Image (tube, rainbow, N blue to C red):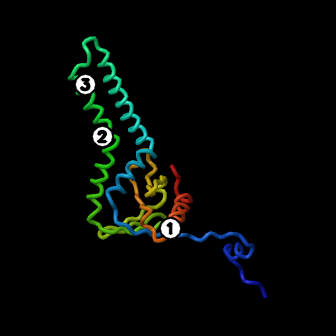
Amino acid sequence: MRAPLRSPLDSAMIWGANVQETSTVELAYVPTSADAAGALRARMRATPAGRLQSWIILASAIVVLGAFAVSFTLPNGPDLGVTVLCLVALALCVGAYVLMPALQGRQVHRMVAPQGEFRAVVDDIGVRLTSRDSETMHRWPMISRYTETDALYVLMTPDKYGVGIVVLPKRGVTEPADVDRLRNILDQNATRV
């Protein structure tokens, strides 16, 4: 009598190969404005468009500081109008760099806060987000890049702007070991930037 045919999975187990099981990490969290601001800052550092924006703001601040310094070398001394203009422009540059993500984060938070608690399931297929009024599935080709902060994983669309983002707060996991498991799933399915 012939032996029954075995599947490749059976053969792998027989020969001692390491067969990897699909892992899943679940998160439950209430979004905060700090999450949104942190995600926007992380996206700014991780995307070419965000880095360009940062360099433009920095270059603008340097030009303003240069104009401010030059105003002190004028024969009649610094002009009050130029000094005030330079200080206002410098405040705008600092505000654009520091305050803009926080202000945008507050706006995003106002949009998602009424949804209450979010639940996320992350696996080898993608990320499923569920809230009070919505359910969304993001497959890995849609969110093919990610970056990590101390508090968040920020998943981004593959375009250079990172227009679409998915924010996964680390505090949403049930066990501390799930933070590392989540990182492993992301490393297997997305590119870290």
Label annotation for residue 83: 3
Residue 182, position as x, y percentages in the image: 51, 63
The type of residue carrying mark 3 is Thr
Q: Is residue 1 above or below residue 141?
A: below
Mark 1 neighbour density, 10 Å: few (under 14) some (14–19) many (20 or more): few
Q: Residue at x 30, y 55 (%)?
A: 108
- Mark 2 touches mark 1? (CB < 8 Å): no
Q: Secondary structure at mark 2?
A: helix
Q: Quadrant of residue 5?
A: bottom right
Q: Which mark is residue 95?
A: 2
Q: Which of the two marks, 2 or 3, is nearer to us in this view?
A: 3
Of the residues shown, which amino acid type is indicated by label 1? Pro
N-terminal of the pair, mark 2 or mark 1, is: 2
Could you say which disc has been placed on residue 176 in the image? 1
Query: Image height check: is 124 above or below 98?
Result: below
Mark 1: secondary structure: loop
